[in-house]
Image (cartoon, rainbow, N blue to C red):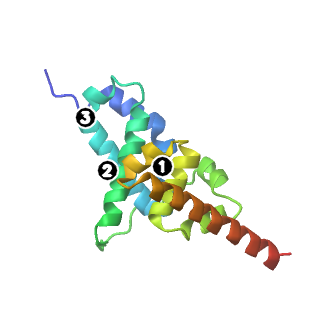
Amino acid sequence: MPEVGVDDPTFERFAEQRLPALYRYAMVLTQNRHDAEDLVQEALTRTGLRWKAIRRKDDPEGYVRTAMVRIMANRWRRPKREVSVPDPPEPATEDAGLERLLDDGLRARIAELPPRMRAVLVLRYVEERGDEEIARLLGCSRGTVKSQVSRGLARLREAVKTEEIEHG
């Protein structure tokens, strides 16, 4: 019997069906199309390697999203290394769902937040996860989660107020 993994048709269907939603989630986390594509690819690769066990669980998409958050948390802990490539990647495709999610200047405001603060807000308000679970996913204390939420919302509110004053 061949090993079940990335060649499994059920995984391929799952990845094909959920790719747009996973990409939108990655965009909110990374605020960068290229980083979002890399994040989705890495999370789906890890998921594909364990698909036989994961597909039996109630929420395979939740598994992928959790993997994405953990990958991001690990990236914050490591120094950033960029690699130049000789050929540009293929052009990105537009996603109307992503554009609706991040329109009205929200994208710029969120992008200004530090990565961990952004992740905490995404987990709380997009994923609707509790403080304990967010703390576990990000490898920090519950108090850190609460303070990051509070500070992140305060920064977003201040940015909205400043923009309203400037634009009358």
- Report if residue 90 is visible in the image: no
Give the residue pinned by disc 1. Answer: 23
The front one of 76 and 34 is: 76
Give the residue pinned by disc 2. Answer: 42
Crowding at label 1, few (<14), some or many (≥20) Cα neighbours within 10 Å?
Answer: many
The front one of 58 and 11 is: 58
Locate residue 142, reporting x and y percent.
45, 52
The amino acid beneath tag 3 is Arg
Mark 1 / mark 3, whichever is N-terminal? 1
Crowding at label 2, few (<14), some or many (≥20) Cα neighbours within 10 Å?
Answer: some
- The quarter of the picture where residue 94 lies is bottom right
Q: CA distance from mark 1 to mark 3?
A: 20 Å
Residue at image location 25% in from the left, 33% down from the top: 7
The amino acid beneath tag 1 is Tyr
Locate residue 39, reporting x and y percent.
38, 54
The amino acid beneath tag 2 is Glu
Task: Specify the farthest residue to the right.
Answer: 168
Task: Specify the farthest residue to the bottom.
Answer: 166
Q: CA distance from mark 1 to mark 2?
A: 12 Å
The answer to whether residue 50 is left or right of residue 156 is left
Residue at image location 41% in from the left, 61% down from the top: 35
Give the residue pinned by disc 3. Answer: 50
